[in-house]
Image (spheres, rainbow, N blue to C red):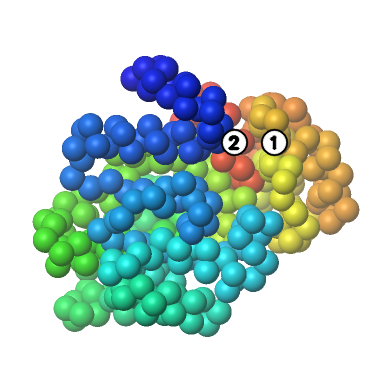
Amino acid sequence: AVVEFVGRMKEACTEIKPSFFELTVAMAYEYFACEQVDIAIIETGLGGRLDSTNIITPVLSVITNIGYDHMNLLGDTLEKIAWEKAGIIKKGIQAVIGEMMPETRPVFETKARDSGSVLYEAGNYYEVLSTQYEDGQMICELSDKKNHRRIDYRLDLAGQYQRQNLCTVLTATRILNKSGFHLPDEQVQSALRSVKKLTGLAGRWDLIRRRPDLILDVGHNKDGIAKIMMQLEEQYPQGNWHFVMGFVNDKDLSGVLSLFDPSKKYYFTQAHIPRALPADMLREQAGAMGLKGESFDDVNEALETALGQACEDDVVIVCGSFFVIAEINQALFSL
């Protein structure tokens, strides 16, 4: 199907020269139309206003949270980034906002008012009261503020940041149900327990091995790395952390690297892609921040070394890039 699609689009591609992402978006939209899917969840690639996904009129727009990333394209303030994200709020279409911040609230409210759209703030509907971890899963006790009840949800995505996403998802399904869809809570709970299995989503606080624990997380910007650090402090307070990290070469890493503790152990690596920051250059930049370690041209070699040096009670974290996570041979390291 992919070869057939590319064959049909070859002439047009030669003329307009779409990016890889733009071409895959077109292929996905055609596939969804042919399959007559009931609901398609479309995630923007970068920003929103000018993103290639943003040619549709959705039944619901969802904005999760705003952080500092792709600042060379989206802007250097939260307000500017929020304005780009708000481009997916369409005329007369309802929108869910996962996290309101003082800097972003006026942006979203102005866009909604100008578009005649109704905003739903997830925090007004749900709140996580407590969190427990069990067998690599996260159990959240939520307050359903509108129905004045408490309910437990079990997620196979165990990153702390999923708590906010959970409230956002539940708010979205609530709005969809009021708009004529039928998404009973039992089905939502079942889906949340098996997100990785149902979608193939990986690298979101993904615990794939025990003793030593091996966690894969695609956190790659300041916001994502900060959340990794928070969860490590909570779940592994003894502090025996080993970081296998690699980044792309088009990011300012000074703010990201400043979040890492010089007392931890580091293994610098790179994915086999043109955009990868060479491992020796990463080691040099990290060294200037007091982070010491070896560099490895191969991701799996770096990980194998880290696991060999870690004690059973330690934790090994692979982070910094989707591409680094993608190159891990999980068959070698999963237990």
Classify 201 as above or below 229. Answer: above
Q: Nearer the viewer, residue 312 or 150?
A: 150
Disc ID at residue 275: 1
164 with respect to 47 (left or right): left
Question: Which residue is located at x 41 percent, y 52 percent?
Answer: 54
> Residue 140: where, in percent of width, then height?
33, 64
Q: Give the amino acid type for the residue marked by disc 2 in the picture.
A: Phe
Mark 1 closeness class: few <14, some 14–19, many ≥20 residues within 10 Å: few
Q: Give the amino acid type for the residue marked by disc 1 in the picture.
A: Arg
Q: Quadrant of residue 248?
A: top right
Q: Disc 1 versus disc 2: distance between alpha carbons?
A: 10 Å
Secondary structure at badge 2 equals: helix
Classify 253 as above or below 97. Answer: above
Question: Which residue is located at x 20 percent, y 62 percent?
Answer: 176
Answer whether residue 18 is visible to the viewer in this image: yes
> Which residue is situated farthest in the front direction here?
15
Q: Are marks 1 and 2 in contact (CB under 8 Å)?
A: yes
Disc ID at residue 323: 2
Mark 1 or mark 2, earlier in chain: 1
Question: Which residue is located at x 69 percent, y 36 percent?
Answer: 275
Mark 2 closeness class: few <14, some 14–19, many ≥20 residues within 10 Å: many
Q: Quadrant of residue 4?
A: top left
Q: Nearer the viewer, residue 1 or 238?
A: 1
> Residue 3: where, in percent of width, then height?
40, 17
> Residue 86: where, in percent of width, then height?
45, 66
* Disc 1 versus disc 2: nearer the observer: 1
325 with respect to 87 (left or right): right
312 with respect to 145 (left or right): right
Q: Quadrant of residue 242?
A: top right
Classify 309 as above or below 140. Answer: above
Secondary structure at badge 1 equals: loop
